[in-house]
Image: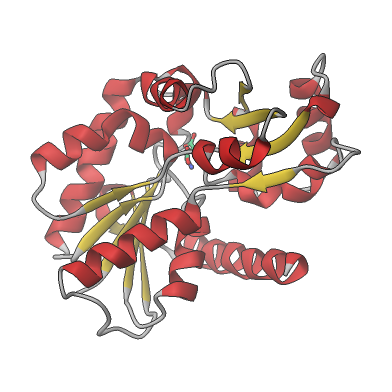
Amino acid sequence: MSIGIFDSGLGGLTVLDKALRLLPDEDYVYYADEGHVPYGEKSPEQIVAYSTAAVSFMESKQVKAVVIACNTATSVAIEQLRARFSMPIVGIEPAVKPAVEQAGSRRILVMATPVTVRESKLRQLIASLDAEDTVDLLAMPGLVHFCEAEEYDSPAVRQYIASRLEGKNLAEYSDLVLGCTHFNHFKKPLAAFFPGGIRMLDGSMGTVRRLKDLLEKQGQRGGGSGRIEYYVTDGQPAGEAVTARAGRLLARLKELEAETE
Ligand code: DGL
């Protein structure tokens, strides 16, 4: 049995990349809803419908667990998905908790999609940490488009980031939470805007650790060899173009990790 990983597009490869490191003896089904990306600019009803279709497809593939490798779909749809499907479903959330723990009295900037920023789930998380006064939220939908187009550090990317950060006192921030799985590809151009340095956090490793615990508890760990099958909207097998793009993105994530280790 495989593990299902689902995102609106190829941002969820950030989670697959960590899963391949921590759980190399598993097989994976990756579903990229390329026909509907970006979720961050859709209505909650649309996101619930798309996510339900994706998890139904995973059910038909008889996966042992599903990872919603999309902060946006997690924030809008996870409760409804868990109520509807019987297989274990693991979501991803912006890593605000570890950021609050390490920031002390410094400020935290959370970047996410417009939907994640608007939804109550993230606001409740921040309130539960008593961190409303130190956490700022910023929607960065343009980065999803740039990532899907494999444009990572161009003048247009830098100009976009500059326009979104305009007016902020960047020296105040000690931590930047990447609250969308597409954003990990932009660590370098983002870091350049924080001259005093900034710590970046994301929820991908935490999500994979939770997946690992869950599979261990269920006695379902292992049995695979790191095989990946790619599917797109409606459960169609991904064509050569998407599969090749996914391969390039995974290779890029590996390179980025090697640089920072
Ligand atoms: N990668 C997704 C996330 O983590 C959503 C991006 C989008 O489709 O807008 O939020």
Farthest right residue in view: 195
Q: Is residue 54 above or below residue 94?
A: below
Q: Nearer the viewer, residue 156 or 96?
A: 96
What count of labels does the image hold? 0
Say which quarter of the image contains residue 137: top right
* Image point (26%, 54%), residue name: 235
> x, y percentage for residue 219?
16, 75
Q: Nearer the viewer, residue 83 or 236?
A: 83
* Image point (26%, 37%), residue name: 78
> Does residue 98 appear left or right of residue 191 in this picture?
left
Q: Is residue 204 above or below residue 237?
A: above
Q: Quadrant of the N terminus?
A: bottom left
Q: Quadrant of the C terminus?
A: bottom right
Q: Nearer the viewer, residue 261 or 31?
A: 261
> x, y percentage for residue 36?
40, 36
Q: In this figure, which colouring scheme has been used for the structure?
A: secondary structure
> x, y percentage for residue 165?
77, 23
> Does residue 156 appear left or right of residue 225 in this picture?
right
Q: Is residue 99 above or below residue 169?
A: below
> Does residue 183 appear left or right of residue 193 in this picture?
left
Say which quarter of the image contains residue 65: bottom left
> x, y percentage for residue 37?
45, 38
Q: Nearer the viewer, residue 60 or 176?
A: 176
* Image point (77%, 40%), residue name: 190
> Does residue 193 appear left or right of residue 142 in this picture?
right
Viewer can see residue 71: yes
Q: Is residue 20 above or below residue 99?
A: below
Viewer can see residue 144: no
